[in-house]
Image (cartoon, coloured by chain):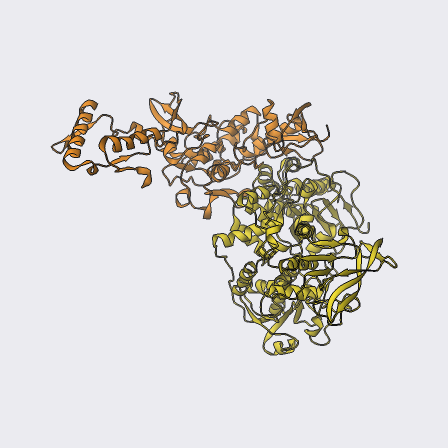
Amino acid sequence: MENLVFSTWGNWKDSPGPAQTDNLPAQFGQGKPLRAFMGWDGMFVRDASVNIVDMTREYAAQAANQSCGHCSPCRECTYRMKEILERICEGQGAEDDLDMLEYMARYVMDSSYCDIGLTSPRPILDAIEHGRDDFLRAIQEKKPIPRGNYVAKVTAPCINACPSHLDIPGYVEKIHLGRWDEALEIIRQDCCLPGTIGRVCVRPCEFNCRRGLMDEPIAIKALKRFAADQELIRGVEPGFSTTETKEDKVAIIGAGPAGLACAYHLGIKGYKTTIFEALPEPGGMAKSGIPDYRLPPDILNYEVSLVEKAGAEIRYGVNVGKDITIEDLTEKGYKAVFVGVGAPEASSMRCEGEDAGYERFMTGIDFLREIAFGRRPIEGKKIAVIGGGNVAMDCVRCALRIGFDDVNLIYRRTEAEMPADPVEIEEAKEEGIKFNFLVQPIKILAENGKVSGLECLKMELGEPDDSGRRRPVPIEGSNFIIECDAMVPAIGQVVVVDRVVPEGTELTRRKTLVVDKITFQSSQPNVFGGGDCITGPATLIGALAAGKNAARFIARYLETGECRPEDTDWMEKTISDLGVYDKEETMPFVGQTRRPRQAALDPSVRIKSFKEVESGFSRADAFKEASRCLRCYRIGLAAV
Amino acid sequence: MGSENVIVIDGQEFFFSAGETILQVAQRNGFDIPTLCYLKGASPTGACRICVVELEGSQNLVASCATPAAPGMVVRTETPRVINSRRTSLEVLLASGQHNCLAQDLSMDSWTDFQVKSMAAKGHDDLCPAYGECRLQDLAVQYQVKTNHFTPADVSYPIEDVNPFIVRDFSRCILCGRCVQACNEIQVNNAISFDYRGSKSKIVTEGDLPLKDSICVFCGECVQACPVGALIPKKDLLLERSSNETRKIRTTCSYCGVGCQLYLHVRNNKVVKVTGVEDVGPNFGSLCVKGRFGYDFINDPERLKIPLIKENGKFREASWDEALNLIAEKLTRIKKESGPDSIMVLSSARITNEENYLAQKFARAVIGTNNIDHCARL
């Protein structure tokens, strides 16, 4: 409640109640107060000196600017509302202007197609209701009102949920209009690996899609893949708009998603980069951790070639920290360094015998890497894979494809707690993987130095732990043995960034690199970092976001010597704090449309090779699916 | 009702089949929900907001054309709120361009200024060519729209008339998108789409070039779909306004064997326009550039109406009997002197399949040659 002049925030929701007065953000960036905010759910004012008339003018201008122009109420009235407010603020307001404003605001809010029209008039009506005297005074006094300082941002539940904030409704609409190249252009502004992400993303956007409250979320991932595939299918040359070439060179450590994204976005800004990669091929975890049947190598290679075209040189087989140090790179003239070395090593299982060096025992991450480079890593007929995440899923499905007859997954909780993508679990079941739930390995058994079995304990679920999932508790005396002749633990990865960064660089207790959450700058001003090496094993899209944002701040550091978040970054945070997706929202009706399914190879066919399982949408399916988007754009405006 | 496929429209229950929109269920049961942007055969866009209805549980009105019926929906089609929204939509559309027909009910002092300004534009010195056939005008009259709420927008696009068939007048475009649907979904030519944003929105070809420099094939599907005076057949503009009534005569297109159904618009015994017949096969209203725009030959003075025989380098008129006898005699002589393979028959796409069959029969059985071909192979 502190410093709150008034708030209407939240009382536009379906079940009208009192406006929210608590837990509204009060700060905008470091030491800067948030004076007032206008947005999709109303407005709140903390500083009585904010000129509400002027702020409404700015908000209306943003709304008019965002109107796509397809439906008539929003197209024809948002700009008229803006013009009236401009007039009032210039001291030329008329008596009936307020009535007209309210009339149009209600009409747009009642009759528009998408949420730009349905939500943007809300705070305008609130402002008139709570500040009517201010508006009337402005009309009567006929004096120009000076412009205040505002920050605007357009978002949507899906955009806000995506770590890289892709303009999802924007490119979905372009796909609907049949403008695939323009859709891809929009995607590439925030994501340089659209074909890759379009195949393997964990898609937080889809879990925050309002269409999902109605029937099924938009198939955002598949639509992105469609746009990316169209470029390849039609042989379109992607356009780059690198206008200027900058002098300063940047070194990037690791050709994984974070490093590639950083190189790409620096390249677009005109910077030449050198990527140092320890392995002989690019892609990092996208290459060695994702099997070919989910991500064909030619897709990744094509997208890496575009990063190179944007100005990156990749040097393979260079192990930074061993062959060369960051200090050496600085001496060689690299003005900034981006560390994107990921989490490439397996974590320990804390199971007896895992360090004994048995044959036919290999960590999941090594197993996948060997397969990615075309080798059969271990011999055997019956394999046990331990873990419940996506890497474990990849291991079991790959094991089947390289000739194991009997593939067993061992997980200490139940299917409901598995962190793996439900689609992956489903496909693995279809392929005949055997799932063993509530089983904890305690000892690896071996004969003649070769794996021969696994001693396990049965588990049961207890109280929820920190992650919110119920904790598995061993059942005393339930020991049993699973026989197998090969074993792959896939229970997590660890970060090795301490071997790369200069001594004295700040690290966390988990040995991850400490960086600023917004700028990605480490405790060494010229060293930036992003991806798994700052978060621990996480998502591909998170790594791409880190690379993209770090590129922006590296450029800023090189140009000004400073590296501070911009107003738009703080705005992003303010919007996230307010929350854009309301999973409790009730929709007016239950939708009747389902998303199309991507065609998939039959399980009996696909387990015989590493051929891609899913094929993309047809043009007709993509068009139809894109038309389901509700375009939940929201506009936020902060007075600072 | 539960999961049964039943919706309530204005207090009455109706069954629907999965996938049907509110509009389809309502129209099937005799409700008159007006539409403007809705184009039969294309996917609904919900752009114009004329077909809005009240839906219980929804904060805002929904477009009935774009909302699939769902079990238990309660819909109201004619409440004051609905009528007010439709009327306002019509008002803003009328005020969005140079709709200087009488549907624009401005106050007297601003009306004259608006008319003068509107008619000053090149090609606007006469009434709107869509006058009397304009869907927006009809709806404005039906809903008794008063447009003095909104000042007419100051739009001045030069008329695009640099091709022989279609005139584009963006100052009268209401951006309903029917032309885009017609081009992309019905004819699948993908020549036009929406571009720019907000109040700057416009229907454009790739690169916003004139139609003649785009991939447009001038089938005129968009012209037939345009509900206002934004897309006009060029020949319409050249026509003198006449009080003589135009008659519509239904016939079959003579250009090829498909058999498209069309209307000849005839005035003073002259064809002045061709439109496709909606709702019947094989073309369901669609036509090609020839069928729609290639009708000048009918009244052309150069048109061959009776047979001509060339004698001493000059044509003279002849009777059909005389002409056919001459042809038969010459073909028989050539066949006798030089053999049947010295003759070739070239048939035409303008005749039917059956007639083409007869032409090859004539070549093979009567003349005795396989030298038979068809212009469509060229």
**Image quadrant in which the C terminus of chain B is located:** top left
Across and down, in percent, residue A448 comes to 74, 71
Of the pair A421 and B168, the residue shown nearer to us: A421
Of the pair A24 and A319, the residue shown nearer to us: A319
Q: Quadrant of residue A93?
A: top right
Question: Can I make out residue A284 in this image?
Answer: no
User: In this rendering, would A213 be left or right of A182?
Assistant: right
User: In this rendering, would B187 be left or right of A154?
Assistant: left
**Image quadrant in which the N terminus of chain B is located:** top right
Q: Which chain is yellow?
A: A
The color chain B is rendered in: orange
Task: Tell me: residue B145, above or below residue A542.
Answer: above
Across and down, in percent, residue A585 comes to 73, 41
Task: Tell me: residue A500, above or below residue A101.
Answer: below
User: In this rendering, would A211 be left or right of A243?
Assistant: right
Task: Please tell me how many numbered marks the rendered image carries.
Answer: 0
Q: Residue at x 70, y 74 (%)?
A: A499
Q: Residue at x 50, y 52 (%)?
A: A233
